[in-house]
Structures are given as structure tokens and as C-alpha cells.
Image: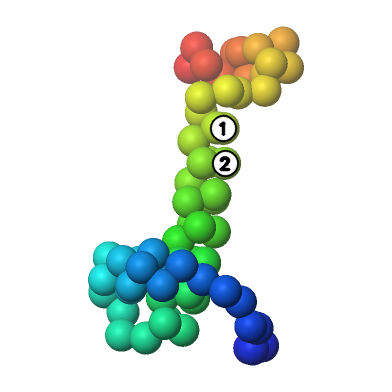
Amino acid sequence: MAKKLVDVDVDALEEAKRILGVASYKETVNAGLREIIAAAARRREIQRFVAPEPHDIEDIAVTESAWR
């Protein structure tokens, strides 16, 4: 793990710490980063269902399997 010096909004940091239920600022930042990464993964997964690639409809195997 690397140490980085950053300026942060202390009020936002305190609120995030409370919401995440962690004890330290380090845990807050790490948990927040993990939450962002997980949220991005969820968005990508949802996009697979919301906006399927247009070529799927033209794929005979995909179309035929839809009727089984």
C-alpha cells in the first residue's frame, strides 16, 4: 500500500466514515474506493441486460436459442 498526501473535504470524509461504519480515515478511503469499483462493475453488468449488443439479434444461434 502506498501513502499519498491529498486535500479532502473533512465534512465529507466524516459523513462517509459514518455511512460506511468504519473507524478510521484510512478505512473510509479504502472502503469508498472499493464501493466505487463495485458500483462500476454493477453498472457494467446492468448495461449487458439494458443495452445488448445489436449484432446478437442477427446471430442465428442466439435467435434460435431464444425460442427454446
The residue that appears at 36% across and 68% down in the rendered structure is 11
- Residue 4, percent across and down? 65, 83
Nearest-to-viewer mark from 1 and 2: 2
Closest to the observer, 21 or 54: 21
The residue that appears at 46% across and 84% down in the rendered structure is 26
Q: Is residue 32 above or below residue 62?
A: below
The answer to whether 14 appears left or right of 7 in the picture is left
Determine if residue 5 is in view. Answer: yes
Closest to the observer, 4 or 51: 4
| Residue type highlighted by circle 2 | Arg
The residue that appears at 54% across and 49% down in the rendered structure is 40
The answer to whether 21 appears left or right of 41 in the picture is left
| Residue type highlighted by circle 1 | Arg
The N terminus: image quadrant? bottom right
Q: Residues within 10 Å of mark 2 (few under 14, many from 20)?
A: few
- Residue 68, percent across and down? 48, 17
Q: Residues within 10 Å of mark 1 (few under 14, many from 20)?
A: few
Kind of element beneath mark 1:
helix
Closest to the observer, 23 or 13: 13
Q: Quadrant of residue 54?
A: top right
The residue that appears at 65% across and 12% down in the rendered structure is 57
Kind of element beneath mark 2:
helix
Name the disc covering residue 44, or none: 2
- Residue 61, percent across and down? 67, 19
Determine if residue 31 is in view. Answer: no
Counting every numbered tag in the picture gives 2
Residue carrying label 1: 48
Assess whether mark 2 and mark 1 are in contact (beta carbons under 8 angstroms).
yes
Name the disc covering residue 33, or none: none
- Residue 64, percent across and down? 60, 13
Q: Is residue 30 above or below residue 60?
A: below
